[in-house]
């Protein structure tokens, strides 16, 4: 690898509450890569992203982002959290919602300068969501909110985008739109992307490599090398069959589609270890 | 008070006679300050979905006020001390306590119980119990106005200091945490601010009815506007209007002030459902 890695893990172990979620993992992600992050529930997709954000230092091994130990609040990282607390009755317009994240860690009264305002409008344009600025959050559909959050994650010209399950609760058509928008914007701006998802097939055309997590391990590589029966059997700790048909890949465990089964009962489960300030 | 109703009805239907009484001007001054503070703080309570925690703080304050009376302190300082301590504890335990309705409800009932116990041992204080529970704005004197002004100023200044991260942490806690905002600090500081606001508010409408000024106007404001500043200003303006109109109606009717404010607060909140939702802000 001649280029400097954006993210590098070397024998890293990530623990939550004394329990190792990812054990002794190592991989390196190069600039501009679009990485699909997959794996069963609780495999550590969110945990890995929190570690990259600097919220969870590895208990062993080394994790570097942009060649440094990650620190909280790095402006070069755009983040779309999996758990997106939106109070159902929150009647705040999109502009104020995004504005809250700009310099949100500073003290004092909130203010929105003209350059900040134009940054918000530009980023909303980039994802084709200009009209959301004036609409209340509670009036938006799931897809619209996702786009708003994506626009927000792109503010400040991040070099790395961490998107934690951006497709959840979207129908197939909106999923495609979101993937297309992300791919287009990130190619143009040469942003490295970690995109976690439940279904591989949606991402096949978009991703450069896949990072598969499971059973405490992580495997990074091209889809054809990683999504294979031996590798996935190891990650799922059970016999896995991989079928390829018509440009789709089906991951089966005893004849059952693993990804779809996961998807059915997922909402809200992987959140157990999350600290957050709202009821939901 | 009823004697005043016979004459001097202005075109707006509100007697101007009432300003001739010092207790009335005091009431307007005190209620005005408290209403603005309540409207502003309440806006964030509603935004954060912590209205019940605010309600509980006032009940905890009741135990503090009666307890202070028992040991010979001014009830207000017992109120402030207890709510402040409870607010800080709730903020610190944040996820575990302050958003759990049942835990809050149990603490709330326990606090009222303690308030009752303190009253039981300090019977001469019993006459003040009604004032504590339901407010007695017409008995406010200059010293109290000065105290309320100080409490209000502290509240607004502290809120101004943390407002930016507070909004960020309220709207997007996960992202705020990732950007280095301490959710625990924000939640603790905010509930401490709420505690002081609740103490001041309880002087006007009583510990049982702080919802009328802290939640009613703020919730109504959030229904009719989607802008941040417009919502804050509308919330404060609604609270002020409801407090002042409530006092005026009470003067006319001789009904309790807190009742009048409660009615106006309810009208304001349910009336906001009739306002067509704004699509553009």
Image (spheres, rainbow, N blue to C red):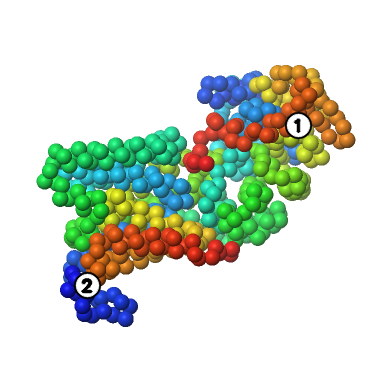
Relative image position of residue A238 (x, y in whole percent): 72, 18
Q: Can residue B170 be seen in this view?
A: yes
Badge 1 marks a residue whose secondary structure is: strand
Q: Residue furthest left?
A: B124
Drawn side of residue A158 relative to residue B174, left or right: right
Chain containing the residue with disc 1: A
State how far apart marks 1 and 2 are (Cα): 76 Å
* Residue depth check, mark 1 versus mark 2: number of the one nearer the observer: 2
Vertical order, B92 against B258 (above or below): above
Q: Nearer the viewer, residue A259 or A18?
A: A259
Relative image position of residue A72 (x, y in whole percent): 55, 37
Relative image position of residue A181 (x, y in whole percent): 74, 49
Q: Which residue is drawn at 21% across and 53% down?
A: B131
Vertical order, A43 against B246 (above or below): above
Drawn side of residue A175 relative to residue A156, left or right: right
Q: Quadrant where the N terminus of chain B lies?
A: bottom left
Q: Name the residue under label 1.
A: A210
Q: Nearer the viewer, residue A276 or B61?
A: B61
Relative image position of residue B104 (x, y in whole percent): 37, 39
Chain containing the residue with disc 2: B
Q: Quadrant where the C terminus of chain B lies?
A: bottom right
Q: Which residue is drawn at 70% across and 18% down?
A: A237
Drawn side of residue B185 relative to residue A119, left or right: left
- Where residue B213 sits, quadrant-wise, is bottom left
Q: How crowded is mark 2: few (under 14 residues within 10 Å), some or many (20 or more)?
A: some
Badge 2 marks a residue whose secondary structure is: helix
What label sits on residue B18 in the rendered view? 2
Q: How crowded is mark 1: few (under 14 residues within 10 Å), some or many (20 or more)?
A: many
- Where residue B247 sits, quadrant-wise, is bottom left
- Where residue B271 sits, quadrant-wise, is bottom left
| Same-chain status of marks 1 and 2 | no
Q: Which residue is drawn at 67% across and 21% down?
A: A215
């Amino acid at each position: 690898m001649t280029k400097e890695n954006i993210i590098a893990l070397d024998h890293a172990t990530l623990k939550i509450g004394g329990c190792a979620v990812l054990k002794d993992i190592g991989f390196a992600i190069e600039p501009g890569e679009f990485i699909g992050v997959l794996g069963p529930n609780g495999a550590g997709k969110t945990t890995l992203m929190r570690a990259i954000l600097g919220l969870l230092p590895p208990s062993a091994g080394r994790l570097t982002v942009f060649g440094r130990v990650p620190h909280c609040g790095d402006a070069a990282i755009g983040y779309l959290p999996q758990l997106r607390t939106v109070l159902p009755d929150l009647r705040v317009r999109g502009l104020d919602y995004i504005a809250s994240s700009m310099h949100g860690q500073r003290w004092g009264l909130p203010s929105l300068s003209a350059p900040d305002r134009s940054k918000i409008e530009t980023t909303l344009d980039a994802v084709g969501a200009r009209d959301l600025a004036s609409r209340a959050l509670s009036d938006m559909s799931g897809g619209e909110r996702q786009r708003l959050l994506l626009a927000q994650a792109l503010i400040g010209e991040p070099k790395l985008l961490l998107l934690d399950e951006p497709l959840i609760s979207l129908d197939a058509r909106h999923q495609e739109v979101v993937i297309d928008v992300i791919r287009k914007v990130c190619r143009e701006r040469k942003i490295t992307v970690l995109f976690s998802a439940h279904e591989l097939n949606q991402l096949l055309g978009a991703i450069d490599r896949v990072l598969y997590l499971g059973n405490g391990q992580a495997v990074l590589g091209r889809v054809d090398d990683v999504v294979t029966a031996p590798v996935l059997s190891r990650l799922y700790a059970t016999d896995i069959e991989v079928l390829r048909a018509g440009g789709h890949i089906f991951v089966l465990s005893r004849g059952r589609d693993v990804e779809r089964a996961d998807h059915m009962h997922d909402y809200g489960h992987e959140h157990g270890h999350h600290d957050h300030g709202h009821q939901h | 008070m009823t004697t005043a109703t016979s004459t001097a009805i202005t075109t707006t239907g509100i007697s101007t006679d009432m300003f001739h009484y010092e207790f009335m001007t005091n009431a307007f001054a005190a209620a005005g300050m408290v209403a603005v503070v309540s409207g502003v703080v309440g806006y964030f309570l509603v935004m954060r979905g912590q209205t019940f925690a605010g309600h509980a703080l006032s009940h905890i304050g009741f135990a503090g006020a009666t307890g202070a009376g028992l040991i010979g302190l001014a009830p207000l300082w017992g109120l402030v001390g207890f709510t402040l301590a409870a607010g800080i504890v709730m903020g610190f335990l944040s996820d575990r306590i302050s958003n759990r309705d049942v835990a809050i409800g149990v603490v709330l009932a326990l606090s009222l119980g303690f308030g009752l116990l303190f009253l039981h041992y300090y019977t001469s204080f019993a006459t003040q119990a009604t004032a504590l529970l339901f407010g007695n704005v017409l008995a406010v004197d200059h010293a109290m106005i000065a105290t309320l002004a100080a409490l209000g100023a502290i509240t607004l200044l502290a809120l101004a200091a943390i407002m930016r991260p507070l909004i960020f942490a309220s709207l997007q806690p996960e992202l705020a945490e990732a950007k280095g905002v301490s959710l625990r600090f924000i939640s603790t500081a905010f509930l401490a601010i709420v505690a002081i606001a609740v103490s001041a508010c309880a002087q006007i409408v009583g510990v049982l009815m702080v919802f009328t000024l802290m939640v009613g106007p703020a919730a109504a404001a959030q229904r009719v506007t989607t802008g941040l500043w417009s919502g804050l200003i509308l919330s404060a303006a609604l609270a002020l209007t409801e407090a002042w109109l409530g006092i005026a109606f009470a003067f006319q009717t001789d009904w309790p002030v807190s009742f009048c404010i409660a009615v106006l607060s309810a009208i304001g909140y349910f009336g906001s459902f009739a306002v067509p939702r704004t699509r553009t802000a």
